[in-house]
């Protein structure tokens, strides 16, 4: 009689076998043969003193793992009686529902937030948008702490997760669903590489547009390395889903944002170098109304009369009587920067002078740290008004007036001088 102590993998597989007891013996052996190498690899990673509890922390309870094997293999769900036996054999659940739910919905919240921020950053190509990710950091950290301290089992056994798994299983039982799952599983290895390349490429693109985005590049490279490492291991350690899912959501959101930015660039910002065009109104990436001349935004319009005198309070309209209403900007008193103050069609606007000032109030100092914004009236340039063409200076095309042909009046002949004596 063998007295060898059963390993953690053997104990775990025994409980999985019990949860699959309603299936034919041949199919049970086929399922276990597929998962045994993964479990053995995990046991080697955990070391010689690996415990069943450690496997449960990574994969969930053997019963929930067996339910996932049923769904992935297209087998029917366990009968009600088997669920009761599994409940008796399963250990008591130590973590509370609150922590498990926080970890689950923290994952959903962080993934959705990452997708939205990536979408906004890709549309505007503005790395400052990604600073909003700091709001998600506390939720993400607390979720990870729960997972790595309490394990994944409590999360997988939440009622909402069980219902979601049953829905996926019912769709998987459909022939078309089975083909879709098989196709998606075949794309997994390539997807992690795509995510890594997209993250690094996005960081380089932001760095080209904004030099200070080089500070963001190391974080994106670290995320790329993390998803390449964690992605293939999610089948063995479900806790790594809290890394793979948010990164995937970020890549998908950025892809949709980049697609939207490309469509906007093609449809609204096409540039023809040999022509000069004027269009109004148009909108920038933030939805503000803009005037455009050629390929550049026009912030202000100055009008002059014939004598070169600047006009004020000029209202602009197009040929159909529609006001050319564009965004008006002013100086923000609190931050000392330019900000939107309204929209109208009255010109000219005050000229905004922006810069920085140091602690002594000197503008544009090298050690400046305070924003400076000042509104100046008047025209910031000298206008050369072309002189209007007058009739006197215009070349006349009328025929020259003919001169009179009347004979000149004859003059009286000069009397000859008398002869001298």
Image: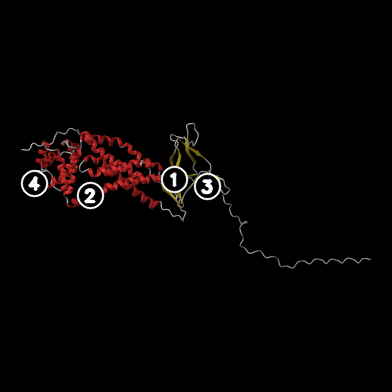
Q: Earlier in the sequence, mark 3 or mark 1?
A: 3
Residue at the left extreme of this rendering: 1
Give neighbour class at mark 4: few <14, some 14-19, many 20+ (Cα, 10 Å).
Answer: few
Q: Out of 343 and 73, give the one closest to the viewer.
A: 73
Number of the front mark, 2 or 1: 2
Q: Which residue is mark 4?
A: 25
Q: Out of 36 and 238, give the one closest to the viewer.
A: 36
Number of the front mark, 3 or 2: 2
How far is the residue under mark 2 from the one under mark 1? Answer: 48 Å
Give neighbour class at mark 3: few <14, some 14-19, many 20+ (Cα, 10 Å).
Answer: some
Is residue 344 left or right of 34 when viewed as pictured?
right
Q: Which residue is mark 2?
A: 184
Q: Which residue is mark 3?
A: 303
Is residue 287 left or right of 394 when viewed as pictured?
left
Quadrant into which the N terminus falls: top left
Residue 357 percent across, percent down from the top left: 48, 35
Q: Which residue is mark 1?
A: 326
How far is the residue under mark 3 from the one under mark 1? Answer: 17 Å
Say the numbered circle drawn on residue 259: none
Residue 41 percent across, percent down from the top left: 18, 42
Residue at the top extreme of this rendering: 360
The answer to whether the residues at label 3 and label 1 have Cβ atoms under 8 Å apart is no
Taking 37 as reference, is 90 above or below it? above
How far is the residue under mark 3 from the one under mark 2? Answer: 63 Å
Q: Earlier in the sequence, mark 1 or mark 4?
A: 4
Q: Earlier in the sequence, mark 2 or mark 4?
A: 4
Q: How many marks?
A: 4
Q: Earlier in the sequence, mark 3 or mark 2?
A: 2
Taking 263 as reference, is 239 above or below it? above
Observer able to see residue 200 = yes
């Amino acid at each position: 009689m063998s007295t060898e102590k059963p390993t953690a993998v053997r104990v775990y597989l025994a409980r999985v076998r019990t949860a699959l007891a309603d299936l034919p013996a041949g199919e049970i052996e086929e399922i276990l043969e597929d998962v045994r190498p993964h479990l053995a690899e995990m046991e080697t990673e955990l070391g010689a003193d690996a415990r069943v509890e450690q496997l449960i922390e990574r994969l969930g309870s053997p019963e929930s793992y067996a339910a996932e094997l049923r769904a992935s293999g297209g087998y029917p769900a366990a009968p009600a009686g088997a669920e009761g036996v599994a409940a008796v054999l399963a250990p008591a659940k130590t973590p509370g529902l609150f922590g498990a739910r926080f970890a689950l919905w923290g994952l959903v919240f962080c993934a959705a937030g990452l997708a939205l921020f990536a979408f906004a950053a890709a549309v505007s190509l503005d790395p400052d948008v990604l600073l909003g990710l700091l709001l998600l950091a506390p939720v993400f950290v607390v979720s990870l702490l729960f997972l790595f301290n309490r394990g994944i089992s409590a999360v997988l056994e939440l009622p909402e997760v069980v219902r979601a798994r049953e829905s996926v299983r019912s769709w998987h039982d459909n022939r078309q669903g089975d083909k879709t799952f098989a196709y998606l599983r075949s794309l997994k290895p390539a997807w992690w590489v795509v995510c890594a390349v997209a993250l690094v490429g996005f960081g380089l693109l932001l760095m080209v547009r904004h030099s200070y985005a080089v500070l963001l590049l190391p974080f994106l490279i670290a995320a790329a390395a993390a998803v390449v490492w964690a992605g293939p291991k999610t089948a063995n350690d479900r806790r790594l889903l809290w890394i793979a899912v948010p990164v995937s959501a970020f890549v998908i959101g950025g892809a949709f944002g980049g697609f939207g930015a490309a469509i906007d660039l093609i449809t609204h910002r096409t540039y023809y170098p040999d022509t000069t065009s004027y269009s109004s109104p148009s909108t920038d990436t933030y939805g503000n109304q803009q005037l455009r001349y050629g390929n550049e935004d026009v912030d202000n319009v100055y009008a002059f009369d014939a004598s070169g005198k600047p006009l004020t309070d000029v209202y602009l309209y197009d040929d159909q009587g529609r006001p050319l209403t564009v965004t008006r900007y002013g100086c923000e008193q609190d931050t000392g920067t330019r900000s939107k103050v309204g929209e109208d069609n009255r010109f000219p606007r005050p000229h905004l002078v922006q810069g920085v000032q140091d602690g002594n109030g000197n503008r544009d100092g090298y050690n400046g740290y305070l924003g400076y914004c000042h509104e100046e009236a008047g025209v910031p340039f000298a206008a050369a008004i072309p002189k209007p063409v007058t009739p006197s200076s215009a070349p006349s095309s009328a025929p020259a007036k003919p001169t009179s042909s009347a004979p000149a009046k004859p003059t009286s002949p000069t009397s000859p001088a008398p002869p001298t004596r």
